[in-house]
Amino acid sequence: MKALTFSETKKILSEYDIPLCQMVLAKTKKEAIVFAEKIGYPVVLKISSPEILHKTEIKGIKINIFDKKTLEKTWDKILLEVKKKKPSAGIEGILIQKQLKGREIVIGMKRNQKFGPVLMFGLGGIFTEVLEDVAFKIAPVSESDAIKMIKEIKGYKVLTAFRGQKQVNLKAIVKIIVSLSKLSLEKEEIKEIDLNPIIVDEKKALIVDTCFLL
Amino acid sequence: MNFKKINKILNPKTIALIGATDRSGSVGLGICKNLLEGKKDRKIFFVNPFRKKIFGQKSYDVIGSIKEPIDLVIVVVPAKIVLKIIKEVVREKVGGIIIISAGFAEAGKKGKILQDKIIETVKKADIPLVGPNCLGILRPSINLNASFAPVSPQKGKIAFISQSGALVDSIIDRSFVENYGFSLIVSYGNEAGLSMCDFLEWAKDDPETKAIGVYVEAIKDGRRFMKVAREVVKKKPLLILKAGKTKTGQKAVSSHTAALAGSQKICSAAFKQVGALEVDSLEELFDNLEALAWQPRCKNGIAVLTNGGGCGVLVADYCEKLGVKLSKLDQKVFRKLEKSKIMHPSFSRGNPLDIIGDALSDRYELAMEVLLSQENVHGLIVAQTLQTMTEVEKNAKVTIAAKKRWPKKPIIALFMGGKYILPGEKMLEKNKIPNYSDPRRAALAISALIKNK
């Protein structure tokens, strides 16, 4: 399976008004530093290559970068790791983004032979991967379907006012689900999508990482 | 598929059976016998070149020798000569075909090729086809049993559409014990022509059908299913039992979504999305269909009447799990019961309403009337444990009477026991009040009756 490049992904997300968190694809260390100083620390660095689908597995993601010095060191470390573990991968550059705080969710799509695009919603991390606490809907997914989907999962409470945190902006999540449903119906060449993670708080929902497969 | 075309198959005036025989132990014999049950309602022709007469009736050597137009042709000959027979059939411009014979796509590559040739032939002739590899079709209300089921079921309001044929046979037998009947039974087999969706559409518009049940292993066209099922549930409840649940998601995967999106989960999500009710067992399927066929549907908020605490608690537990609300009872209810002087002084002032083990039918009668006359009680479960003084038949009688006074509120009976409650159960079910012997089954049934939970 082939993945979309960063710029292709960015273009398609903006076409459907799906909000990506502020990030740039830096080609050089210097570019990365300029961007980090502009948006402020802490930042996250991520390897960007259409041939690397699971960045964590090859240590292609580094978080908690609080200053320029760490950024420079981390930049070299990532490139070294990738060279060691996936020497053949074509590198587009390193993505740099602000390290966001909030609750994690996952929204995805898989094209099913018989039903067409199937949308998935779940909480991030172990909720999705270990507990498989996810909900599915067949596209087209309406706003009311999307709300049902969010409330269907067992861990829904995590998104509500809970342990001193405010309820997250459910409307922002609904909007992403409905837009992704539309995208999936229109762009038939895309077979699978992960928007994982998406960071949500009481105001907004921002996509932190994506995987678009053809 | 238009209704008129499928109607030739489901309401034929003339039927020809190719492969008719009186050879004992054969499928052909089974169909002959079943078809003859409806000989007052339609003409039956037998085709078999090796017989002169079958059951005293003339046997034709080929279908072409029958002079009358044929609405439905049933083919039950060995797979290898089916194509040849179909080619003869399509020359006659018949209304529809059922191929009972097995040995097609379900049997492997060769069978699939043969099936594709048959599809091509009937498509060109524009003749609707059921099967192959199926049991056939039954409509008890018009004495149509175009199947090799061992026995014909009673008529009723349940339409059962099944991918499996063999299951149908045993379900029919079970229906005599459980006292329900059918408006339609279709075993659609390999779906080479008409599919599950075509029969769903037919059952949706069939005035006799009140509730539709489906047994399915694989859904052929998911997107069409979504469209059709959405229309169906607007008019009638649709219950689905889906087999093949153990299959897990894709193994070697690239995205997280693909890893989690197993075909069973997608089917379950689709059923939920269109408003169909997915059930876990055949027992649950027919328990609920029986309730839906016999009782009206209602809003959420019911009452539970019982003569035993344990039974009441169990019902309450299951109801909570299923999202069935037990209505808050008015103080007036309790005052009325207290004043009646027939209540045990320690009857529970709550819902479930426990009228205590020594309750006779007069207590049941009064409690039912008081509960059903309360506005926020939309339905009722009448539970009865078998105590030494319990009046099973009289309790059934007062339940039936209450049902007559409150026709718009569903009543589910939970007369628990076996041998000794049987006379009561018979009376109840004769009057279309379903009885279940397990609190969970009763709770599931009332849950199926509740709209917009």
Image (cartoon, coloured by chain):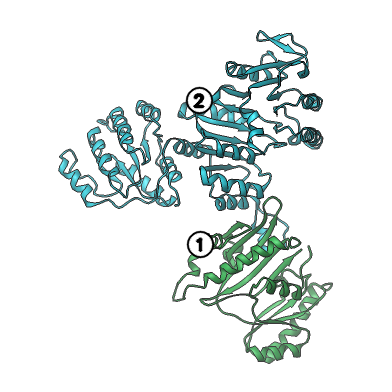
| Nearest to the observer: residue B56 or residue A67 | B56
Q: From this view, report whether residue B175 is shown above or below residue B23.
A: below
Q: Is residue A53 left or right of residue B211?
A: right
- Mark 1 sits on what residue? A151
**Residue B50 location (% of width, % of height):** 77, 12
Residue B30 shown left or right of residue B91 in the figure = left
Amino acid identity at mark 2: Gln
Same subunit, tags 2 and 1? no
**Residue B382 quadrant:** top left
Residue under numbered circle 2: B154
Quadrant, the C terminus of chain A: bottom right
- The image shows residue B384 at horizontal and vertical percentages of 32, 36
Amino acid type, callout 1:
Lys
Q: Is any part of residue A175 visible from this angle? A: yes
Q: CA distance from mark 2 to mark 1?
A: 43 Å
Quarter of the figure with the N terminus of chain A: bottom right
x 35%, y 41%: residue: B381
Which chain is rendered green in the image?
A: A
Q: Nearer the viewer, residue B329 or A27?
A: B329
